[in-house]
């Protein structure tokens, strides 16, 4: 998870809360997410430095203008103009987590090197719920850079059982 994605998600969530339009903002993000999934090249277009800023802004406006709240559109335009369009999918994921947390639901962001099977996901969810004594919604993502293992981020805590983290610990011990 990037710091940039979190900053944009938090800013958008604050705007939604201030406007008391969290449902409209969420629906707007549904449209954006759907558009990105249906047209994978669209994110590449919005991210490309080879395409002029004006053209990227025009493409964004053509796709979502008047279909999403104005404040949301302004934030998306800001992301594109500053070269952060690649962060859109992650920003949307973090925004959804913020919504859940606001509703009092606990969210566990689970990062693995390979996708979890349904059985593995259920077992992990049960273990997290037992550990934290509450219902836990899981958001699973795959990050091949972990090499192996699992990393769980929830309620400001990080449980890192990844091979990458273990190798880093060994490296630190060897360097001291």
Image: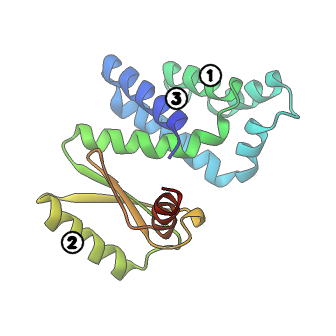
Foreground residue, 166 or 176? Answer: 176
Q: What is the spatial separation of the Cα atoms under label 2 and label 1, in whole angstroms?
A: 40 Å
Which residue is located at x 21 percent, y 71 percent?
127
- For the residue pair 99 and 35, the one nearer the viewer reads as 99
Residue at 88% x, 34% y is 50
Q: Nearer the viewer, mark 2 or mark 3?
A: 2
Specify the farthest residue to the front.
176
Q: Nearer the viewer, mark 2 or mark 1?
A: 2
Residue 162 on image: x %, y %: 45, 67
In the image, residue 68 above or below residue 108 = above
Placement of 27 over or under 153, stated as above or below: above
As measured in the structure, the alpha-carbon distance from the residue carrying label 2 to the one carrying label 3 is 37 Å
Disc 3 versus disc 1: distance between alpha carbons?
15 Å
| Residue corresponding to mark 1 | 78
- Whichever of labels 3 and 1 marks the residue nearer the N terminus, that label is 3
Instruction: Note whether 137 is above or below 91 in the view shown.
Output: below
Compared across the picture, whether 32 is left or right of 149 comes to right
User: In this view of the protein, which residue sits in the foreground, 104 or 31?
Assistant: 104
Q: Quick one: label 2 or label 1, which is nearer the N terminus? A: 1
Contact check, label 2 and label 1, Cβ < 8 Å = no
Residue that carries the numbered disc 3 in the rendered image: 68
Disc 3 secondary structure class = loop
Q: Which residue is mark 2?
A: 126
Name the one closer to the observer, 6 or 102. Answer: 6
First along the sequence among labels 2 and 3: 3
The residue shown at (39%, 43%) is 96
Locate residue 2 relative to residue 17 in the image: left or right.
Answer: right
Q: Is residue 3 left or right of residue 55?
A: left
- When asked about the image quadrant of residue 160, the answer is bottom left
């Amino acid at each position: 998870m990037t710091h940039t994605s979190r900053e944009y998600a938090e800013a958008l969530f604050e705007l939604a809360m201030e406007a008391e339009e969290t449902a409209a903002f969420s629906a707007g993000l549904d449209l954006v997410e759907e558009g990105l999934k249906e047209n994978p090249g669209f994110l590449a277009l919005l991210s490309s430095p080879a395409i002029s800023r004006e053209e990227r802004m025009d493409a964004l406006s053509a796709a979502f203008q008047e279909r999403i709240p104005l404040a949301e559109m302004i934030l998306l335009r800001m992301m594109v103009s500053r070269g952060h369009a690649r962060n859109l999918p992650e920003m949307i994921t973090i925004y959804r987590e913020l919504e859940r947390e606001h509703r009092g639901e606990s969210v566990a962001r689970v990062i693995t090197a390979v996708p979890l099977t349904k059985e593995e996901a259920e077992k992990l969810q049960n273990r997290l719920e037992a550990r934290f004594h509450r219902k836990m919604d899981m958001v699973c993502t795959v990050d091949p850079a972990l090499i192996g293992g699992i990393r769980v981020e929830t309620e400001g805590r990080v449980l890192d059982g990844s091979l990458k983290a273990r190798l880093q610990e060994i490296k630190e011990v060897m360097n001291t």
